[in-house]
Image (cartoon, rainbow, N blue to C red):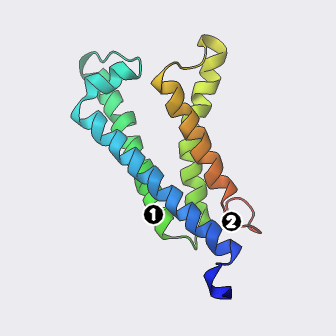
Amino acid sequence: MAGAIAHPARRRAHWRSQLLGVCATAHSLAALAALLNPDRVAEAMGLFLVGVNGYSQFYAIYVGVRLATAGLALLASRRGDQPILGDLAALFILAQPLGRFVAAFAIGLPKGSLFLVCVAEVLAGLALLALRPRGNALFR
């Protein structure tokens, strides 16, 4: 019977690994959508892409950074013995809503689907930090 209920630390590690996998999948799919239809994704984000530099910058952020975040989250999901990887993935995920929060002081909060994306990023990032192994200082 004792084997049926996993140790709390193992449950936390399992849920953190699962959430990291979901984050990796979500960021991969977002990068794929941006790669396949940059104009539509840009429009949904309130952007209008102009010229080579506009597209280059869009691909750098919405494809490159998203794929890097996905890769880091995937690596972290498989390397639970190194909690810093999950912490870094969480910080990458939280960096986007942080930027939006800073912008909110000047121009307001995002609207529509981007607001929902922002809420999901905050929840996922904070959940990853909340599920980190106990007894470990952040970034150890």
Q: Are marks 1 and 2 in contact (CB under 8 Å)?
A: no
Nearer the observer, disc 1 or disc 2?
A: 1
- Type of amino acid at the residue the image marks with label 1: Leu
Residue found 62% across the figure and 82% down from its top = 4
Which residue is identified by label 1? 75
Position above or below: 87 against 91: below
- Type of amino acid at the residue the image marks with label 2: Arg
Position above or below: 87 against 93: below
Residue found 60% across the figure and 20% down from its top = 103
Precedes in sequence: disc 1 or disc 2 = 1
Residue found 61% across the figure and 54% down from its top = 128
Question: Badge 1: few (under 14), some or many (20 or more) residues near its Cα, within 10 Å?
Answer: some
Residue 11 on image: x %, y %: 63, 70
Answer with left or right where residue 87 lies relative to residue 33: right
Tag 1 secondary structure: helix
Question: Can the viewer see residue 72 in this picture?
Answer: no
Which residue is identified by label 2? 140
What separation in Å lies between label 1 and label 2 (alpha carbons)? 17 Å
Tag 2 secondary structure: loop
Residue 19 on image: x %, y %: 52, 56
Position above or below: 124 against 39: below
Residue 16 on image: x %, y %: 58, 61
